[in-house]
Amino acid sequence: MKAEFVKSAVYPVDYPDEGLPEIAFVGRSNVGKSSMMNKLINRKGLVKVSATPGKTKTINFFRIDDHIMLVDLPGYGYARVSKKDRAMWNKAIGAYLEKRGILKACVLILDMRRKPSEEDLDMLQMLADFGISTLIAVTKSDKLSGNQRKKQMAIIAEELELEVEDLFEFSAETGKGKDALWQTLEEIALS
Ligand code: GTP
Ligand code: MG
């Protein structure tokens, strides 16, 4: 698989104009968006993984095999950012989701150890309002034991009014769920 960083953008005028179908990754800051993308494309350091949360501040585009664009969106919900920064990020994400016609689907990422937050639910609502197909990936599965995993998956599904089968279990550490998620994303992008 060929994977290349294309560019960073904040405003729509700066988005790439190659017209490739896009899949975007959204979720709270530090949830593991960048790690998931790296794992999916088998490139350890292509997407920057943060030691401190809130690191991804721009919309970052990665071209995969010349036929799909993966898009890393800035994380939400990090408390220690200024109001001004937060407003800018919200605007940037909102503009992208609302206007990007070639966006085929979003992957909303949740941490398996936590209940979905208000902001996660708001984001899901925004995606639904914009009519964007959304996959839910529950990551950091390696951090829990088998029993805890089952329990947490059930809690998360219930909070979202979904079935456990609707959720993609994932671990960037072990690669669990990687093939299932990637296959689904490719199908959606190329459909
Ligand atoms: P921002 O760009 O700041 O919004 O963060 P992000 O959502 O891109 O998260 P990132 O991928 O940078 O990961 C945040 C931290 O979680 C890093 O320390 C990762 O190593 C860790 N992490 C991410 N995914 C996993 C996982 O599946 N398992 C484990 N054990 N750690 C993970
Ligand atoms: Mg990131």
Image (cartoon, helix red, strand yellow):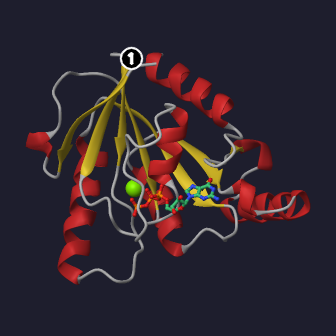
The residue carrying mark 1 is 65
Q: Is 140 located above or below residue 43 in the figure?
A: below
Crowding near the residue tagged with mark 1, few <14, some 14–19, many ≥20 C-alpha atoms within 10 Å: few
Q: Which residue sits at x=66%, y=71%?
A: 114
Label 1 CB less than 8 angstroms from ligand 2:
no
Q: Which residue sits at x=53%, y=45%?
A: 36
List the single residue furthest toward the front.
44
**Does residue 121 appear left or right of residue 48 in this picture?**
right
- In the rendered image, which quarter is residue 3 located in? top left
- Tell me residue 54's x, y (percent): 35, 68
**Does residue 16 appear left or right of residue 127 in this picture?**
left
Q: How many marks?
A: 1
User: In this view of the protein, which residue sits in the foreground, 88 or 80?
Assistant: 80
Q: Is 78 located above or below residue 10 in the figure?
A: below
Q: Is 191 located above or below residue 16 in the figure?
A: above
Residue 13 shows in the view: yes
If the picture is divided into quarters, which one holds ligand 2?
Answer: bottom left
User: In this view of the protein, which residue sits in the foreground, 116 or 71?
Assistant: 71
User: In this view of the protein, which residue sits in the foreground, 132 or 140?
Assistant: 140
- Give the amino acid at mark 1: Asp
- Tell me residue 32's x, y (percent): 52, 56
**Does residue 98 appear left or right of residue 149 in this picture?**
left
- In the rendered image, which quarter is residue 184 located in? top right
- Tell me residue 147's x, y (percent): 91, 61
Q: Which residue sits at x=23%, y=42%?
A: 99
Residue 128 shows in the view: no
Q: Which residue sits at x=68%, y=30%?
A: 180
- Tell me residue 190's x, y (percent): 45, 16
Disc 1 element: loop
